[in-house]
Image (cartoon, helix red, strand yellow):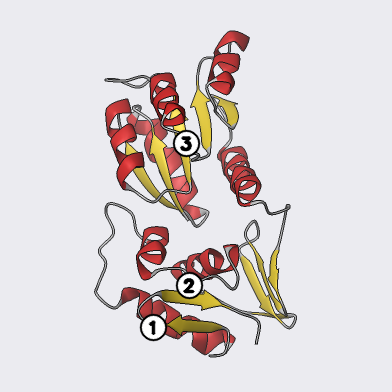
Amino acid sequence: MKLLLAEDDPMIGESMQLGLRQSGFVVDWARDGAAAELAVKTGGYALLVLDIGLPRQDGLAVLKHLRQAEHTLPVLIVTARDAVADRVAGLNLGADDYLVKPFDLDELVARVRALLRRHSGRGPGEMRLGELCLDPDRREVTLSGQAIALSQREFALLEALLTRPGTVVSRESLEDCLYGWDGEISSNAIEVHLHNLRRKLGGEWIRNVRGVGYKIVAP
């Protein structure tokens, strides 16, 4: 899944981006509020990790504009402001959760995963379809009880399809899940990853709806 990180501190931003990427997320990083707001409007993000003290436009203004525009993107505020009034202001403007700096990267990842589950309507833990099981927290996939070794992008692709089982997902949406601003996308990248995924799971799991996209179904 692709996340947007809005953070102006270079060291903190680099650490957060690295930690989230190591947990399997694609992460674009905006260094100021205006860039973050523009990115939300143009990119297919699953969640925004938003610092309050941003230059050009502070995080609360970004959040206010998004909610005024009826944008439902989940927002996790991260900030050094630990006063109750600041937390209440963020939540009242439409933030979904609040994390005070300094924090452990494991907690950041756990909060992000919890918000994504809540937003998608899933319960905690595993995603299942027939004999196929994907555990986002453990980064594990099993089929009929047998572990399946997947690359990071194969895992992300399968997770994106399992989020909406039986529903056609466009090629463009899958690309958005796999690649950030600095990712180079070859013309057949999605097809290559899908080919490898089908080889490991079995060709009957993932179906191509010609001219529309792909969907995952239980055989």
Label whose residue precedes the other's in the sequence (3 or 2): 3
Picture quarter containing residue 217?
bottom right
Q: Position of residue 102 (x, y in %)?
A: 54, 25
Q: Position of residue 86 (x, y in %)?
A: 55, 13
Element type where label 1 sits in the image: loop
Discs 1/3, front: 1
Tell me the residue that label 2 is attached to. 154
Mark 1 neighbour density, 10 Å: few (under 14) some (14–19) many (20 or more): few
CA distance separating discs 3 and 2:
24 Å
The amino acid beneath tag 3 is: Val
The amino acid beneath tag 2 is: Glu
The amino acid beneath tag 1 is: Arg
Q: Quadrant of the C terminus?
A: bottom right
- Specify the label residue 49 is tagged with: 3
Tell me the residue that label 1 is attached to. 210
**Is label 2 in contact with label 1 (beta carbons under 8 Å)?**
no
CA distance separating discs 2 and 1:
21 Å
